[in-house]
Amino acid sequence: MRTESGQIFKLGDYRPTDFVVERIDLTFELDPAATKVVSRMILHRREGVAADAALVLDGDELTLDGLQLDGNDIDPAGYAVTPDSLTIRALPESGPFEITVSTTISPETNTTLMGLYRSSGVYCTQCEAEGFRRITYFYDRPDVLAVYTVTVIARKDDAKLLLSNGNFLGGGDYDEGRHFAAWFDPHPKPSYLFALVGGDLGMIEDSFTTMSGRDVALKIYVEHGKEARAAYAMDALKRSMKWDEEVYGREYDLDIFQIVAVSDFNMGAMENKGLNVFNDKYVLADPETATDADYANIEAIIAHEYFHNWTGNRITCRDWFQLCLKEGLTVYRDHTFSADQRSAPVKRIAEIRLLKAHQFPEDAGPLAHPVRPQKYREINNFYTATVYEKGSEVVRMIRTILGAEDFRKGMDLYFERHDGDASTIEDFLACFTDASGRDLTQFALWYSQAGTPLVTVSTDWNEAGKTFSVTLEQSLAPTPGQSRKALMHIPLAYGLILPDGREFEGQPHGGEAGNGVFHLTKRKQTFRFAGVPERPVLSINRGFSAPVNIAMEQSIADLAHIARHDSDGVARWQAINDHATRSLISAARLSRDDRKLPSVAELAEILIATAADESLEPAFRAQTLTLPSESDIAREIGGNIDPDAIHAAREAVMKEVAHAGLETFAALADSAPTGPYSPDAEDAGKRALAATAMAYASIAEGWPDRLKKAFDAADNMTMMAQALQLLVYQFASAEETREALESFRARFADNPLALDKWHTIQAMAPGAKSYDRVEHLLAGPDFDRTNPNRMRALVGAFSAGNPTGFNRADGAGYRLLAREVIAIDKRNPQLAARLLTALRSWQSLESGRQEHARLALVSIREAGALSADVSDIVDRMLP
Ligand code: 0A1
Ligand code: ZN
C-alpha cells in the first residue's frame, strides 16, 4: 500500500515519456502466494530524447527478481530499483531493444483489490488507475499504448479457466499438473486496460453478429450455480452492442467479448479490453433476489462498460486529468441508452435526482473540483460524481448547444480523427467546433471551473405593450483553489406557457436564443419577447438543460400551471418537486423552532391528483409522489442543518398527504402487476407506483399488519424489500417487523447480495437508535468487513443514507465512521477513502454536530500511517 508521499500531480506538468513501448509479452505463473511475472517489452527511444536519458518505470510494492537487456542480465550498476520505481540507464541510442523484467507478487495477501488479487478463490486484476504497477514495473500511465500478448500458466486444480484481453491464441498442457492459455490483443492499449482472470467459474454464452456481419462470441462467467442469474446481463449486453451500432455507428472489434463477475470489487465494473470485470452485484439478478433498481443498474453498467470500448479504449486519455473524456462521455452514452430502452422523462428525472443528491453537494463542499481537475494527490479519489455525472451533463450541454445533427457529426469526427489516440478535452471539443463551426471557448470553462452556477431569474410582464422579458443573471461561488470565476456559457431550455396551456412561439431579442434555448453568456442578460397575447408563465431550465441552481420567485400558481401544461414531462415533475421543496423547507424551519407546521393541502391535492391520473405513466407518477429526500432538503437549506428538524418536517408533510389521499394510495398500493415477473420498464414502473403508494397508505393506516401481509405475499424482491423497508422505518418495534427481518435473514442466509439489502434497510432506518443497530450488525458473526459490498451496504448506507442516525447529536455516528475508516484503510485504502466522503458536507451542519464531525476527522488524521487515499480526503476536508 502506498502511504502518503505528499506529491502533487499537476495538469500543466504533462510531458510524454522518453521511450516508446511497442509491444509487451507477459507471462504469468499463477500461484496464490508467489505468482511469477515476466514482462518482455520492445521499446525505442523517442526521437529527440537525449542519449543519456534513463528509462524510469513505475512500481508499487514490487520486488525485482531479474532484469535483462536484449537477453543479457543488466549489471547492477546500470540500474536502480525501489519498490516504487525502476530506473535503467545506458540504453541503446537508437533502434528497438528488449527489456525483460521479472517480479514475484502475492495475490492472496493483496487486500487492496488493485493489481492482481484473489476474490473467493478467483485470480483477477484491477489496473485502473494505477494497479498495473503492482504487477510489474512499467510506464503505468494512459498515454503509453502497447500491443499485449499474455500467457497464463496455472495448476489445473488452482485455475481451470485462464483469461486475458483480446482473442484466444491457444492453450493446453504446460507441465506436470499445469496448463496454459495465450491471448493476443491486436489493439494497442494502456496498461490500465490490462486484465487477467484465473479460476473455476460457470459460464453462459451467446453470440452477436455485428453490422458488418462478423460473429462475436459473448461469454459471461460467474460462480458455479449462479449462471441463470447472468441472463439479464447477457440480454443487456446484446442490446448495448446493437444500440452503439445504430446510434453511433460503432462496431465491436474483437472475436470475443467476455465478462467476469467477482465478489470483491472496489467499484461497479471495469472496461478492460475484451474482458470486462464486474462487481457481481451488477451482473447477478433474478426476481427473487434483485429489485427493479438492480436490473436497471445492471443494464446501465453493462452498457457503460461496453460503450467504453470506443469511448475510453479505442480513444483513451492522455493523462488522468482527462478522466472525464472517457467517463463523462461514456456516462452520457449510457444515460441515453437507458433513456431509449426505458421512459426518457422518467430516466431523466432519476438522473437529475442523482446529480443533485451526489454531485451538487460535492461541488458545494471542501471536495469540490473541476470536471477536469488541475491537480491531484491521489487519482483514485477523482472517480467522483463530478467527473462522471457532471462530466456527462457537460456532454449533454454540447448536444443542446449544437443540436442532434451537429453533435453526431462531431462524434463521428472524434472517432475518425482520434481512433488509437490518447486524447485530451481540447481534442474532443475541437471536433465539435470543426463539425459545427461553433466556438466553444467560453463553454470549455465547464471543464475547468468547479462549483454549481447559480442563475437568478426574474420576469417582467408589460400588459399594455404585450411584452414579456426574462432577465437572467449568473454567479459562481468560490471553490477550493478557485476564488475568482469567469462567466460561463449556460444553455437554458425554456418555454413560455400561455394561460390556456399553449406555448408562445415567438423569438426573443436581447441575446442569443434558438430552438427554445437561452444562451446565457454574460453576467446579466435580458431576453425580450414582443407580441405576447397574455401573461405567460416561464418554464426555465427545462429537462435540466444545464446543471445549475435556479433562484426565481415563482408563485405556487405558476408552478401549478407548469405542472399541468408543460409540454416537457421533466419540467412538469420539476415544478411539482419545486413546490414540494418549498413546503418542506418552510416546514423544516418551523420544526427547528418548535413551531406548528402549516397545512400543505395544496401540495397534497396536486400529489394525489397526480397519483390518480391514469393518463400519466406509472413510473412518472411514482417519481412525482416521491418527496425530496431529507438530504435534498438539507442541501436546499444550505447551512446550520438540523437533520432531526428536517426529518420531523418531512414526516409531517408525508403524513398529511397520506391522510388526505388514503383511498387513492390504498388502491394503488395493491396495483402491482401480478403474474410472471418482468423487469421491463412498464412493469417496473407499475411496481414503483404501488411501492410509493404503499408508503403513504401505511403511514395513514398506522398498522404494520398490512405491510407484513405485503411482505409475506411478495413474489419478487422489489415489493418484498419495499414492505420490509417500510416496516423497519415506520414500525421499528412492531412484532411484525421483527418477524419480517428474521424471515428475510433466514431465507437469504446464503445469498450475500440479498443480505446486503437486509443490512442497508436497517442501516438507513431513521432515528438515533439506528446507530446501536449498526454497531450490533457490524459485530454479527457473519459480517465480513473485508468485502467492499458488505461495508458499503452497512457502513456506507448508514453514513451516506441515514441523515438522522449518522448525524446523531452526540457524534457517535461520526466516531463509528472514523473508527471503521481507520481500520479498513490498512487493507483497502480506496474503500476507506470513499466511505469517508460521507462527511463531505460536515461544515453545513449546526455547530454542535459540526464540532463532533471535526473531531472525528481530526482523530483520523491523528491515527497516523494513513494511506495516500485517506490522507488526501482528510486534508481536503479539514481547513
Ligand atoms: N473505469 C471504470 C471505473 C473504475 C475505476 C477504478 C477502478 O478501480 C478499482 C475500478 C473501476 C468505469 O468507469 O466503469
Ligand atoms: Zn466508466
Image (tube, grey):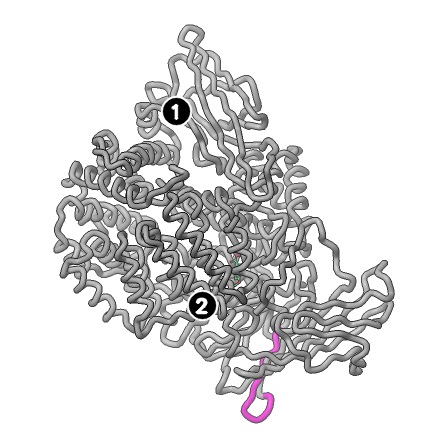
**Residue 401 sits above or below residue 32 on the image:** above
Tag count: 2
Residues rendered magenta in the picture: 174-183
Q: Is label 2 in a helix, a strand or a loop? A: helix
Q: Which residue is mark 1?
A: 553
Amino acid type indicated by mark 1: Glu
**What is the residue that sits farthest to the bottom in this orientation?**
176
* Identity of the residue drawn at 58% across and 58% down: 378
Compared to 136, does 634 lie above or below? above
Marks 2 and 1, how far apart at CA: 49 Å
**Does dot 1 land on a helix, a strand or a loop?**
loop
The image shows residue 538 at horizontal and vertical percentages of 41, 23
Residue 292 position within the rendered picture, expressed as x and y whole percent measured from the top left = 33, 55
Is 255 positioned to the left or the right of 296 in the image?
Answer: right
Residue corresponding to mark 2: 823
From the top left corner, tell me how far across and down residue 598 is, in percent: 22, 31
Residue 423 in view of the camera: yes
- Which residue lies at the image location 27% right of the left edge and 69% below the top edge? 748
Q: Nearer the viewer, residue 196 or 243?
A: 196
Q: Which mark is residue 625?
A: none
